[in-house]
Amino acid sequence: MKEYLLKSIITALVFIGISIAFDAIFNKIDIIWKYLINGVLFGFVYEGWWHFYQKGVFSKKKIMSLFKKKRTSTFLAAMISLMLTIGCKPSSDYCTVKGIAKGYQDGTKFELQDYWHGCKVVGTAVVKDGAFEIHPNVSAPTHVFLYQDDLQLQDFFLEPGTILVNMDAAVGEDYGPGVTGTPSNDTLDEYRVLKKEGREDAMQALVDSVFAATQTGPLVVSCVDSGFKPAGEALDALKRLSPELSDLRFVKNLMEEMSLLAKTEPTADYKPHFLDLEYADLSGEKIRLSSVVNNPQNRYVLLDFWATWCRPCIRYLPQMKQVYAKYHGKGLEIVSVSIDSSEKKWRSFLEENGVDWISVLDDLGGKRTSKVWENYAISVIPMFLLIDGTTGEILFRENQPDLDAIFSELLP
């Protein structure tokens, strides 16, 4: 039996190698776990068959004569293994991404990362004559980011059809208009045009149409993930999704998040009480959020979730400094909770940028086992929650608030 197990493992490794080598020819190595299952399955099945054949378990001469030669059975097992490997692959014909790359040199490499599937790479392209084309290795709708090296250039949806992307090197990182060709991307592009023009009413009307009962596509998932609607309404929208989306782990996690979010998301009729947190500040002293809120000098407490690697968070820093300098003396306190995984980077950033309000570090980096997630369901940063120092109620929860406009009314 030990010999059988050893042979099975060796054969499994051989079949895994053959599968990967064969697939590498077509540049589709992205679901290695299927190769593992495939190789182990056929390794044990094949070696088990050969083991019991030698033991004389099989007696039907016609069956045995067909597989009597070991080389024949090895070839058949390998072929079946390869066919299953190919068969379980996502199709690269699901959709096509065609792009114009203005200002990018020939040879520039672009990469598509699948946000809903752990940011795995689902396609690459090299610029030639100012254009590129990608046939993503997917088989269902998803949300992707287009990268050049470590720079996020654009994001859009993969869905059946031809997706047209216009890139301009002079703009660089840009989440503005420029991606069209399929229903979800056309709507997203329309929203970004309206945002660029500052037409907020039209933007809200477009978001409302996405949450209509007839909408079941990827744009719904993205709008929920971006926090465009209250948690209750978001949950209802997620429940209407098509099966190919509702079965995704990302969507299931999002539904869990919305359930948690309902605990701390204020609405017109409901103002939840803040949930306590306790973390160490720069000096190592443990700071409880409740002690800050209950301080009679603090009329309002702005709870800020951020990280040093978050560019939108960094862009908010000048506004936060201005607001703190202007309103701290009138009763505003800020508590910034970083979800950085590196304490060293967090400390260096605060010291270099002269952040002088209360800053603490979530030592679990905002993972689902941390209080940041359990209590506040923070999955998008920056995220700001305003707490009333008198009642402890959460007055708003937003990721892009106009802080000066808010506090000019609250603390005139």
Image (cartoon, rainbow, N blue to C red):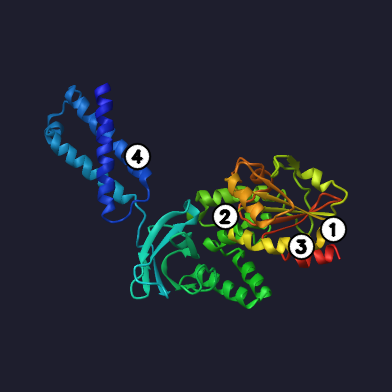
Please tell me whether mark 4 or mark 1 is closer to you in this view. 1
**What residue sits right under mark 4 in the picture?**
37
Give the quadrant of residue 8: top left
**What residue sits right under mark 1 in the picture?**
329
Q: Earlier in the sequence, mark 2 or mark 1?
A: 2
Whole-percent x and y of residue 26?
Answer: 28, 56
| Three-letter code, disc 2 | Trp
Look at the numbered discs 3 and 1 and tell me whether their residues touch, using CB distance below 8 Å: no
| Three-letter code, disc 4 | Ile
Q: Earlier in the sequence, mark 3 or mark 2?
A: 2
Q: Residue at x 33, y 54 (%)?
A: 28
Left or right, 214 with reference to 6: right
Q: Earlier in the sequence, mark 4 or mark 1?
A: 4
Dot 4: what SS? helix
Whole-percent x and y of residue 172?
Answer: 50, 70
Q: Earlier in the sequence, mark 3 or mark 1?
A: 3
**What residue sits right under mark 2 in the picture?**
309
Dot 1: what SS? helix
Look at the numbered discs 2 and 1 and tell me whether their residues touch, using CB distance below 8 Å: no
**What residue sits right under mark 3 in the picture?**
323
Q: Residues within 10 Å of mark 2 (few under 14, many from 20)?
A: few
Q: Residues within 10 Å of mark 1 (few under 14, many from 20)?
A: few
